[in-house]
Amino acid sequence: MGRVTDLNITGKDESAFAADMGMAHEFLVTAILIRLGFEVGVMQVSRTPYDLWLLAYDRPDGNSVSLRVQIKTVSKGGTIKLTGGTRGGIDREYKSDVKEYKYSTEHSDLLIGVDRNTFDLYLVPTSFLDDWGKSKAVSLLKPLKNNWDLLMNWNDEFIISLRNDLIQS
């Protein structure tokens, strides 16, 4: 009997499968957010630095806040890549890293990392990324794992408190 977390049972080429997995995770995150009761829209234009828009709340029963959301797959090694603008795969050749950029509040408001093995979501405000490198281990992001309170309290006070929790963990 199979499991919902089984991977690549057809044996698709790894580089092609990696691209498909990214797309699948966008759909999974969209479905999870809708199941939680949020309004979500999928970006139809692939040239944007975000994959979804999401209506969160500044406090429970508060005003809605529109967020631009970037979806990233957590690597096999347990890290989230915090950069965009490049594509992986053996069929790609890049002469420079000119197109690569690190995500910031200029690009999106929230980065959601999807654990490929458990479907856990790591909700990372992009304002946190300023002090980080090009990737972050999810073992350091436990306060952000499936933290739906962030989406119900998208305000400066809550985000600062969450950042402090992250620093202390």
Image (cartoon, helix red, strand yellow):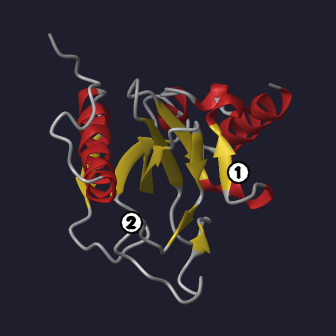
Asked whether 144 or 113 is in front, the reply is 113
Picture residue at 17% right of the left edge, 16% below the top: 2
Is residue 154 visible to the viewer in this orientation of the structure? no
Which sits in the foreground, 122 or 86? Answer: 86
Amino acid type, residue under disc 2 in the picture = Gly
| Type of amino acid at the residue the image marks with label 1 | Phe
- Is residue 62 rendered to the left or right of residue 39? right
Residue at 39 percent across and 65 percent down: it is 89
The residue beneath circle 1 is 128
Task: Tell me: residue 120, above or below residue 76.
Answer: above
Question: How many labels were placed on the picture?
Answer: 2
In the image: residue 108, left or right of residue 39:
right
Where does the image place residue 123, in percent across and percent down from the top left?
Answer: 53, 39
Element on which disc 1 rests: helix
Q: Quadrant of the N terminus?
A: top left
How busy is the neighbourhood of tag 1: few (under 14 within 10 Å), some, or many (20 plus)? some
Q: Which residue is the site of mark 2?
A: 89
